[in-house]
Image: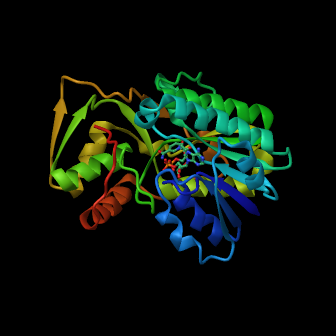
Amino acid sequence: MKVLVTGGAGYVGTSLIPQLLDAGHHVRVLDNLMAGGDQLLPFFSRPHFEFIKGDIRNPDDVKAAVRGQDAVAHLAAIVGYPACRKDPVLAEQVNVTGTRNLAQALSRQQLVIFGSTGSNYGAVEDICTEETPLNPLSLYGQTKTIAEAHLLEHCSAVAFRFATAFGLSPRLRLDLLVNDFTYKAVTQQYLVVYEAHFMRTFIHVRDMGRAFLLALDNADQMLRQVYNVGSDVMNYSKRDVCDLVQKQVDCYVHYAEIGEDADKRNYVVSYDKIGRLGYQTAVTLEEGISELVKGFQVLDFKTPYSNV
Ligand SMILES: NC(=O)c1ccc[n+]([C@@H]2O[C@H](COP(=O)([O-])OP(=O)(O)OC[C@H]3O[C@@H](n4cnc5c(N)ncnc54)[C@H](O)[C@@H]3O)[C@@H](O)[C@H]2O)c1
């Protein structure tokens, strides 16, 4: 199939692109390269890879990018609560208006698979299923919730509410909880953790890519539906994550009694629905931490955001 990946230069996109190419798909990326584009260089030698530098906020760029495509993996966004909080106007324009531009440009024959998020749930006491009322606590979650509803109403869409990603990708993000904790453990040998009992849910970035492949292969039965994407065995408290990091890295963890995590998410998610389609994650948290430790030992990453 011909697959457009919006935001393909990002953390998830650069992990997804080789998975799509290896599965025989043609890949076109639309990205404005707001965080640079070096990470795309390895893909230009692949004959079925094409890049368009453009902006999801510009309807003409979006129309040109979707032309001739069978499906779209919609990833372009201002991602995470710190980035959205820093520039709320941009977050709204990219996450909401950009998604509306995409919906407007697509025909009903074109499939769109939306990279939505478990942030839409907020803090929930019961186990979250796809029917749990949405209560996003951050601007990030609010914009993603609006975008998800718009695509489901106006397009041939599948929405994936992903767990929090972890693991190495060509465009690494350190504001993600597991990546951030492991980075600090390796580079500073200590961690300060607030609200250690808060429950979070995780997925390796390559397993996110495997979900997009599943939707391309099973679009007929997945259409117009929402799926939580992750694993029932990867609902962990922040303290659990620290314990797993400490098994691999010699570091001190301070569980702070005073202070709070600005990311208020505290939830456990059920992944039964996507599991019934045969989807299972392949990479454990232990394996992801191991690859991160190796990566952090040799590379010097810079990031404006962190998780603690
Ligand atoms: N990483 C996670 O844990 C996670 C979890 C759930 C959902 N998601 C979703 O997956 C998607 C990708 O996330 P990511 O982690 O790769 O983020 P990222 O920030 O690494 O990538 C986002 C990409 O979008 C591009 N972009 C931003 N504004 C744009 C614009 N105006 N026009 C065109 N491109 C633009 C950026 O240049 C970047 O390449 C997002 O939609 C995010 O909400 C991510």
**Which residue is found at the position 57% from the left and 23% from the top?**
134
**Which residue is found at the position 63% from the left and 45% from the top?**
274
- In the picture, measured across the screen, residue 153 lies left or right of residue 290, that is right
The type of colouring in the image is rainbow
The image quarter containing residue 125 is: top left
* Residue 1 shows in the view: yes
**Which residue is found at the position 53% from the left and 60% from the top?**
14
Q: Position of residue 105 (x, y in %)?
A: 79, 44
**Which residue is found at the position 24% from the left and 64% from the top?**
297
Quick check: 171 above or below 106?
below
- Depth check: give the residue in front, 128 or 93: 93
- Depth check: give the residue in front, 219 or 296: 296
Q: Position of residue 138 (x, y in %)?
A: 47, 26
Q: Position of residue 190 (x, y in %)?
A: 16, 46
Q: Position of residue 44 (x, y in %)?
A: 59, 73
- Depth check: give the residue in front, 306 or 202: 306
Quick check: 220 above or below 84?
below
The image quarter containing residue 81 is: top left
Number of on-image labels? 0
- In the picture, measured across the screen, residue 226 lies left or right of residue 256, that is right
